[in-house]
Image (tube, rainbow, N blue to C red):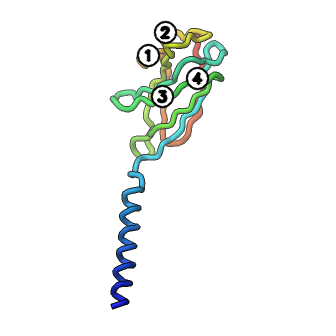
Amino acid sequence: MGSSRRWFGCTSGFASICAILFFTLPESERPRTAVRGHVTHNGHAVKGAAVAFAPVGEFAEYPSAPIDASGCFHVESVWQKEAHSREHYRIYLIPFRDQRPEFPIPARYTSPATSGLEVALGSEPTYLEIQLKD
């Protein structure tokens, strides 16, 4: 009788631990990859805006991140859709409404259709130097 209680207690404990782990482990999702960079306009750091990436040829997530006071940004997203593939993204800037940039961003850089900035991104971390010109 004592050994069957011990067996039941051990199995119940093990089952409880498995159930807790099952419900607390995160769902499997694709690894997120960082894209960092620096944005300048005529040699000056861009501030008061966000950088955004629009996928070319499909409707999907548009990863974006604010640009800090030194002109740097850090975007973390799922860039790779299939193993070892690289997807093309159009880069554009979104000026913040409540701030006036020290150096106004030319209007063509505020739309993915007219910015002329494009990059191919895969799953590896990437650093970009984005230099805007008048």
Q: Earlier in the sequence, mark 3 or mark 2?
A: 3
Would you say the residues marked 2 and 1 are in contact, meaning their CB atoms lie under 8 Å apart? Answer: yes
Q: Is residue 100 left or right of residue 30?
A: right
Answer with mark 3 or mark 4, whichever residue precedes in sequence.
3
Q: CA distance from mark 2 to mark 1?
A: 8 Å
Per the rendering, the mark at residue 10 is none
Give the foreground label among 4 and 2. Answer: 2
Task: Assess disc 1: are there few (<14), some (14-19) or many (≥20) residues with their C-alpha within 10 Å of its C-alpha.
Answer: some
- Tell which circle, 4 or 1, labels the residue nearer the N-terminal end: 1
> Which numbered marker is on residue 64?
3
- Residue type at numbered disc 1: Ser
Q: Position of residue 96 (x, y in %)?
A: 51, 16
Between the residue at mark 4 and the residue at mark 2, the CA separation in whole angstroms equals: 16 Å
Which residue is denoted by mark 1 in the rendering? 111
Taking depth in this image into account, of 67 and 81 the one nearest to the observer is 67
Residue 107's tag is 2
Q: Amino acid at mark 4?
A: Ile
Of the image marks 1 and 3, the number of the one nearer the N terminus: 3
SS at mark 2 in the image: helix
- Discs 1/3, front: 3
Q: Residue 100: horizontal and vertical position, in percent?
A: 56, 10
Residue at image coords 47%, 15%: 110
Q: Nearer the viewer, mark 3 or mark 4?
A: 3
The label shown at residue 130 is 4
Can you say whether 5 is above or below 129 in the image? below
